[in-house]
Structure formats: structure tokens, C-alpha cells
Amino acid sequence: MRLYNSLTRAPEELPPPPGPIRMYVCGPTVYQRVHVGNARPFVLGIWIKRWLERRGYEVKLVSNITDVDDRVYEASAEQRIGSRELAASASEWYRQDTGDLGLGRPDVEPLASETIPEIVALVEELLERGAAYVADGDVYFRVASHPEYGRLSGARLEEMIAQEPSELKVDQRDFALWKAQKPGEDFAWESPWGPGRPGWHIECSAMAEKFLGSEFEIHGGGNDLRFPHHENELAQSRAAGRPFARLWMHNGMLELDQEKMAKSVGNVRTLREVLDVWGREALLVYFLTGQWRKPIDFTPEAMEAAAARAEGFRNVFRDENKPLPPEAWAEFAAALDDDFNTAQALAVIHEWTDHELLRRALDVFGLASLAKQTEAPRELRALAERRERARAERDFGEADRLRGEIEDAGWEVRDVAEGFQLVPKR
Ligand SMILES: [Zn+2]
């Protein structure tokens, strides 16, 4: 299997099965309900794990929750609640909303707040190596100590010096590993440099190492994290002598057309709202339609199209099973093995009429539910049977009236060779 590596800017072959494949995906900063865009790296991480496991790999997926960050302090101050309280509630919202995607959980979901001793130890190591310095209770990473800085993101010097300018920095490219508690911040952790809290980037370096070791196969996250977050993670871990991640996967962003959305379904932008409006199956099919590295437009039309495609799959299971030769699977597998091209895989299975094969393919993406037919309630089946008799007696007026009654209950009656089918209306 090949995956595109942002670090080398080329597709790379994974080691042969069983691997292991150790994978870290950056999770969200939790201070409000997560944006629908946050679902993409979550979904992609679990999909790749599921696919690799079917390919005979041993996979460990770690995805963190950033519950210590500037934004948590800012949002909690605005809402006049404790920062730890807000972070705990928002972590729970994130678990609920991503849980409703029906894909299960990553193997480990560490919290930054539970990794403070490991973070402090890593900062101390960087200080000992001369790759960091203390300034007024803050600790900064010395960017000049890592000659490869900028290689991952290709960031320009102007971008590098624009991140959090401070008089305490020796070089404006430097970034904080530890931040001293500021006035108005209601909570801090003790450290050798005084009370404070970790910088965002060092949290991920420490959490990845704690659960995956000093070297691991894949590091994922949204394209917006390439700089400064991932560049800084890589710099500090390498400067501490760790090989760190070998392959970097950066998924394209969701491009929300807020104006179109507002006109059609209101101001929908959180994962919760999207799940409530369209449901998990439509959202997962929508993600399948895009190649993971590319941005995708998030519009009401795109979601309607995805919902229609999901319904199309349900219809295949309502129709007759027409088995395909087992080689059909190889074409599907080849699409996923080639940089996890789900859009291509979707095009392959679009034509499939083999129930077992299609169910197996959909199951890779957590969509085996599309193969399950919802049974109509008994009263409705009785109405449909009465309609059958009315038709047999050529009482079409009564048959139409019964059809209307079934439709009012939210079901559609379809006439098929062996009688009728009751299908929930979309
Ligand atoms: Zn991260």
C-alpha cells in the first residue's frame, strides 16, 4: 500500500504486513462543539486503520484531545466558567459527536492535561541539549538549533516570524514550549520554571511518544496544521534525538459555503448540526467522494448528492442479488492501496450488484448499515396487503387511498415481481 508523504512530497510504500503501523492523528482543541471539518482527519484515521487491518497489518491509532490551549482560556473567560470545566465539557461533546459517526474510537485518546509530567520531562531534555532556553517563566525552542526547520511545511521566513511575536524570544522564529501563567488564567500546573502550562506543539510530541514510542510510521492531521504545529512538533522531537514520524499525511480542508448553507438549512457548521440534518451515512459517503489530500466543498447540494448515493446503495440491497466474480474485489482494493483513493473505490463499487461483496466494501467505511433493511411496522404491512387485494380486485380508488395512508406514515410502497416492498421515505 502506498500513501503520499508530505515530508518527501512523494507517495511511499508502507512496510509489508503485519507492520506494525503506529499512527498518530492530531485531534481538536476543545472549547466548543467541533466544526464539521474536524471530522475529516478523525474519519480518515479510522478508515485507514480499518483498511490496513483488512490487509493484515497490526495498527495502533492514537488521536489526542488538546484540552490545554490559549483558546480554552480565552473561551472560558468569555463565558465566565472555569477553564478546566469548559475543557472537560467540550471533550465530552467531541466524544459524543464523533461517536455518533458510528466508527468506534481510536485505540488511545490522550488528553494533554494528563500528559504534563511527560511534557515537562521532554522540555527539560531540550534545555539540557541547548535546544531551548528559559525566559521569564516561559521556555522557548531555539529554532536555529534545528537546521532542517521549514522542510516539512516549506514555510517562508515571514510566516515563521509571525507566530506569536515576543520580546522574550532570542529569535522571532522561536516558539513556546512552556508558557508562564498569565493574569486572568484561572488554572496552571507546577513546573521547574514556575506555574504555567505547555505550548500546543510540545503536547503532541509528548503524547505521540508516550503511546507510540520515539519513532512511528504515520502522523496525520489537517493541512492547516502543517505550519506551525507539525513543523514545530518535528523540530522539537528531532532536536531531542527522536526519529519521530516517518510519513506525514495532511488531509485537505472542508470549504464551507456559509451563504448557500444559510439559505438552504440555516447556519450549519458543527459536526453535531451536520449529523442532525443529514445523518452519519450521508456524511460518510460525502467524505468518500473526495480524495483525502484535496480540499472539498461542503455545500447543501454536495450533502444532498451524498444522501442520494447512500439511498442508491440501500436500493441495491432491495434489488435482486447478482453475484460478481471474486476478482471484482481486487479492483476495489487496488484503489484503496493507491494512496487510499476513496473516490476511485466509490466509482468501482457504484456498479456493484453483488450483495455480499458490496456489504464487505461498505463495511470498510463503517457503512454496512446501508445493507440492513428497516422492517416496516406490522400495521403498515397489513395496509400494503389490503392494497394488494384492492388492486387484484381492480378497485384502484381504494388502492390509491391505501397508498396515501402508507405514505402519510412515512413509507413508500413499491411494486415488485414477488408482490410489494415497503421502503422508508427519505
Ligand atoms: Zn497535534
Image (cartoon, rainbow, N blue to C red):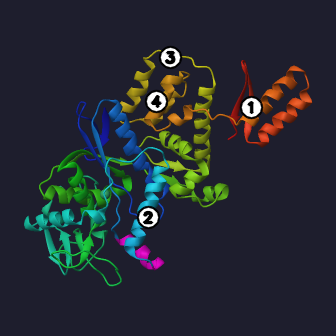
- Which numbered dot is residue 381? 1
Mark 2 or mark 4: whose residue is earlier in sequence: 2
| Range drawn in magenta | 70-80
Mark 3 or mark 4: whose residue is earlier in sequence: 3
For marks 3 and 4, give the CA distance: 13 Å
Q: Which of 333 and 2 is in front in this view?
A: 333
Q: The disc labelled 2 sits on which kind of residue?
A: Ala
* Residue tagged 3: 324
Give the structural element (helix, strand or loop) at label 3: loop
Mark 1 or mark 2: whose residue is earlier in sequence: 2
For marks 1 and 2, give the CA distance: 44 Å
Which of label 2 and label 4 is nearer to you? 2
Percent x, y for residue 124? 13, 67
265 left or right, relative to 101: right
Q: Is the stretch drawn in magenta largely helix, strand or loop? A: helix
Mark 1 or mark 3: whose residue is earlier in sequence: 3
Q: The disc labelled 4 sits on which kind of residue?
A: Ala
Which of label 1 and label 4 is nearer to you? 1
* Residue tagged 2: 90
* Residue tagged 4: 361
Give the structural element (helix, strand or loop) at label 1: helix
